[in-house]
Image (cartoon, helix red, strand yellow):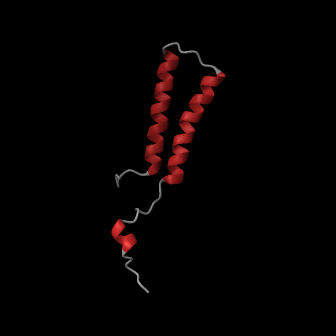
Amino acid sequence: MFTSINRHTVIGAWIAILTAVAGVGALSGMSITMDGTVLWLLACVVPPAVMLMLWHEAPAQTVAEILHPIDRR
C-alpha cells in the first residue's frame, strides 16, 4: 500500500468526490428526495467507516514472520 497516503486523506478525497457528483446531479436537474439524501449519506459514511475499522497502522506480518518468529523464548 502507499506509504505517503494516510487514511484521513483517502476519506477526505472520498467525500469530496461524492460531494462533487451530488453537486453535478443537483445542477443537472436531478430531483432531491429523502430517499436520495439517505442513499447519499450512506454512500458517504459507510465506506470511510469500514476503512477506518480495517486500516491498521502497523503493517501486516509476512508469511516468514508468522512461520518463524524472531523473538523465540
Q: Quadrant of the C terminus?
A: bottom left
Using the image as rendered, state which of residue 6 and residue 35 is in the foreground.
35
Using the image as rendered, state which of residue 70 and residue 30 is in the foreground.
70
The residue most toward the front is 67
Residue shown at 36%/76% (left/top)? 68
The residue most toward the right is 34
Using the image as rendered, state which of residue 64 and residue 4 is in the foreground.
64
Q: Would residue 59 appear left or right of 53 to someone viewing this image?
A: left
Q: How many numbered callouts? A: 0
Q: Is residue 53 above or below residue 29?
A: below
Q: Residue 69 at what x, y percent from top left? A: 39, 77
Q: Residue 25 at what x, y percent from top left? A: 49, 19
Residue shown at 61%/26% (left/top)? 37
Q: Residue 23 at what x, y percent from top left? A: 50, 23
Q: Residue 40 at what x, y percent from top left? A: 56, 30
Residue shown at 37%/79% (left/top)? 70
Q: Would residue 53 appear left or right of 13 to someone viewing this image?
A: right
Q: Is residue 43 above or below residue 55?
A: above
The residue most toward the top is 29
Residue shown at 52%/44% (left/top)? 48
Q: Is residue 43 above or below residue 56?
A: above
